[in-house]
Amino acid sequence: MPTNTNHKNWMKGTSPWKGAALAMLLESPGHPYGLAGRLGKRLGAAWPVKAGDLYRILENLEKYGLVEPRPSQPYPTGKAHRARKTYQATPLTAGAVDEWMTSLHSDGGPMGLELCVRIAVARPKDVPFLLGLLDVRESECLDLLKEYAKEHPDDRLFGMELELIRKYTVAQIKATLEWIEVVRGSLEEFSGSAPSSARSS
């Protein structure tokens, strides 16, 4: 079984679903459609999770020994019958989830989505790392606010479009900053009230 879990290999790319799939399999085995449904319930309709994407991701993670298929019963698909491939965690999965959870974010991926996905599958012991990621995201947002501070007043259509886009972006950034404060408060409250045994599990 392959054992290479180097960050530059299995975590390479912009998809946040790799670490999420591993975290879900730590909870219980599942096939891609089931995993997509479980993860989708946590994230909501704003970020749909496609089972087809998870199929490809799990096949790739299997090459690194991070997941493995387990035998399951075939199911009918019209005239033919096809085995439903169910995956389960391996001894390497937990360490890979730790590696993903404690890294900043996937190369070039959208930090907002990445952060929400990690929150959706986080374990109690991940709270300190999530708080650190919130600090990173907050710093990114504040830097963006500085970049978008200058207005673009212009009577021409093109100038008006620039200003409307700027206002939209600023509103989104401010909303994200407010959300960060809410999440930070909730995580800090959990961290302070949860038993030490729960925080370390």
Image (cartoon, grey):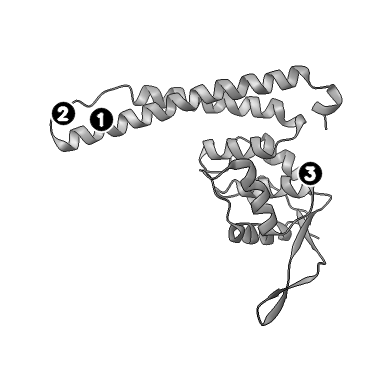
Label 3 sits on a secondary structure element that is helix
Q: Give whichever of discs 3 and 2 has the lower sequence position.
A: 3
Identity, as a three-letter code, of the amino acid under mark 3: Ala
- How far apart marks 3 and 2 lie (CA) works out to 55 Å
Q: Give whichever of discs 1 and 2 has the lower sequence position.
A: 2
Label 1 sits on a secondary structure element that is helix
- How far apart marks 3 and 1 lie (CA) works out to 47 Å
Label 2 sits on a secondary structure element that is loop
Name the residue rendered at 68%, 58% in the picture: 32
Choose between 64 and 124: the one closer to the eye: 124
65, above or below 46, in the image? below
Left or right: 171 with respect to 76? left
Q: Residue placed farthest to the bottom in the image?
A: 79
The residue beneath circle 2 is 154
Q: Report the number of numbered marks.
A: 3
Position of residue 199 measured from the top left corner of the image (x, y, whole percent)? 80, 27
Whether pointer 1 and pointer 2 mark residues with C-beta atoms closer than 8 Å, the reply is: yes
- How far apart marks 1 and 2 lie (CA) works out to 8 Å
Position of residue 20 measured from the top left corner of the image (x, y, whole percent)? 67, 46
Position of residue 133 measured from the top left corner of the image (x, y, whole percent)? 60, 29
